[in-house]
Image (cartoon, grey):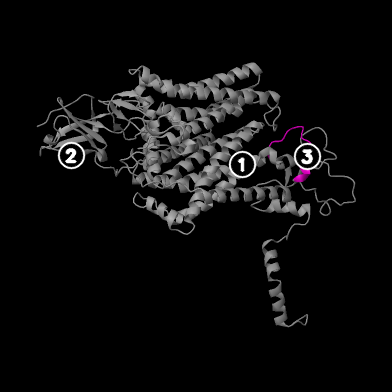
Amino acid sequence: MRSEDVQEKDEKVSRRDFLTISALATGALALLGIVAGVFRFFKSDASYEEARSFKIGKPENFPVGTFRNIADKKVFIVSDDAGVYAISSVCTHLGCLVYETDTGFQCPCHGSKYNQVGKVISGPAPRGLPWYEITQDVDGSLVVDSSREVPAGTKNRFS
Amino acid sequence: MNETGQSGISKFTGNLKTLADSFTSSVFRGGKPSSDKARASVIYNNFFMHIQGVKTHINTLRPSYTLGMGLIALFLFLIVVASGIFLMVYYNPSLENAFKTVKNINNVVFGGKVARNVHKWAGEGMIVFLFLHMARVFFTSSYKAGREFNWLIGIVLLILTFALNLTGYLLPWDQLSYWATVIVSNIMMSPKELTDSLGLTKFFDVGTFTTDFVFAGLNPGKESLNRIYLFHVMLLPIVISVFVGIHFWRIRKDGGLTKPEDFSVRNSDIGYVLEPDKTSGIFPTHKTYGLMELAKGKTPAVDKDIENTVMSWPNLLIAELAVLMVTLAGVLIYSYYIDAPLKEMANALIPENPAKAPWYFLGLQELLSYSAFMGGVGLPSAALLGLALIPYLDREQYKVGVWFTDSTGKKIAVESFIISVIVIIGMLVFAVNFGWLRNWFPEIPQLVITLINPGSIWVGFMILWSLFVIKRTGSTRMGAMALFVMFLVSYVILTYFATEMRGPNWGFYWSKSQWPIH
């Protein structure tokens, strides 16, 4: 009888062990919650950044052959036979601003070079310059949304 | 009432005359220690002294052993903290005011320019002396014999020092700060280069997470400056202070600095070690025996002062004071003649050309110009991991405390030095003249560019070379020696190359005077 009792007691978790384990587990959970909360706390909800969608004016301001650098919006607006398009001027390598050259674009920081449609031709940039969506507002002016990318080569005619 | 018959006034004037002495003795209760026993008790009982042992090994005092590097780094840190508090009086971390207040400190505030120069140069000096200290510890095998963990703490201190320097660099919000912030935030985003290639970004976007955590958004703005300031003046200094404490505590627990096993006192040691003063205290002079002590070992140490140690007071304290004075003088002289740079106010529309990181990151920037992820995240992590693992992969316990271990060690160090200089310069020449994969195969997938670039090839070469050295010499210590020499050489050469030979558009120029005017 007694030996069986002892055996049974061994297999069950003793009250002391149970309390220890549950205390440790609760502590670990609480710590995890705090850590997650801290990371969530650091992720700011309000953004002080400028709106990434902006008007650039009426289509007639961009006749065929226009090449304009809108520096404060970090975008190039180009217009050719096929239509108007917007290419980002932010280098995809480390975020410097590219400038235009005869063959396309060039970044001053680490020498990335892009061709006229923003494709990487040399240097460390991991991908081409993004093309942004251009739409027309009800008042007729063109709107560039630099939070929306379109496939390179997307050109639209507006009137 | 008046037992001695003195008048009250004469007692008062008597007290007045002895005021200085009685005040001093009320603060320093024991008075100036006059015996070794008293000196021991000062070290033992004083809060500021107890970080050191009562006795110090003569080897520690030999200037040629430590060269005082770690101590200089510590004193530079204290100087940085002190000067930083002065700068905080005027600095204001907001986009509108940051640049103005730094300019104010520089040009208007009394002593402001010196305070800023001291803060800047002492902070950057910490990096230099931490590297030198690390080299000393490495080349004397001092990461061994139970000191592995302290080596790790040291690497943590190095990383924290980099972080402190970088966050400080961003605070003036001039052109250098702004474009460095842009570059750093993009480096933090660069793991996307890898996760994008592998199609993992939507599950595991570590790049966005860290950037958002540090800069409160993906573009540097007012929130970013606030956080950088918080990290620079609160979080990082507190953390580094704790780790400095642990670092020193471990030195005490490991029995002081390393020393060679066959250490013997030389005649020249008398130059910086004072004879034990046994005229008073527990050792009467007329006795002909010394106190024997059984430390580790088989025989009692007879006829030696205990284990070749001398009193820390005054021997060690004088040495430390001397290093402090030299450090302070060096920082002040340097800061008097050379001004910390301050460019124009941050302008998000005009990138610097060339946009260069602070010098201590320029070696990395050279690697960044092949791949953002490998140069900014992959290779630095590999280098730090390699440094951290050295004491665990090399566990040979011979010749601890001897510079370059032995003649083979010296040979391997020189050999690795020459080979790494040749290979890394050859690699840079090749990359400058012939470009890299993208120039030859424009359609190549990004993953290939990320993984196969001059930086990763160089790291691969270092690993293979040290494995070859291990095989040839049969010693892991020699492999570690080769690896560490190559690490130092690549840091120095890459830094020099990116500082002096990279000009506008990251093009190659023999010197700054050849830069095109733009």
Q: Main secondary structure of the magenta part?
A: loop
Q: Which residue is mark 1?
A: B70
User: SS of the residue at dot 2?
Assistant: strand
Mark 3 vs mark 1: in front: 1
CB contact under 8 Å: marks 3 and 2: no
Query: As displayed, is residue B337 above or below residue B374?
Result: below
Q: Which residue is mark 3?
A: B307
Q: Which residues are magenta?
A: B254-271
- Residue at x 68% of width, y 64% of height: B24
- Residue at x 32% of width, y 24% of height: A120
**Whether marks 3 and 2 lie on the same chain:** no
Q: Which residue is mark 2?
A: A55
Q: Residue B28: which disc?
A: none
User: SS of the residue at dot 1?
Assistant: helix
Chain for mark 2? A
Q: Is residue B214 left or right of residue B289?
A: left
Q: Is residue B446 left or right of residue B268?
A: left
**Image quadrant for the C terminus of chain B?**
top left
Q: Residues within 10 Å of mark 3 (few under 14, many from 20)?
A: some
State the separation of the CA atoms marked 3 and 2: 81 Å
Query: As displayed, is residue B316 above or below residue A132?
Result: below
Dot placed on the residue nearer the N-terminal end, 3 or 1: 1
Chain for mark 3? B
**Residue B19 screen position, x and y as percent:** 68, 71
**Image quadrant for the N terminus of chain B?**
bottom right
**Residue B253 screen position, x and y as percent:** 66, 40
Identify which amino acid the numbered label 2 is placed on.
Lys
- Residue at x 46% of width, y 48% of height: B233
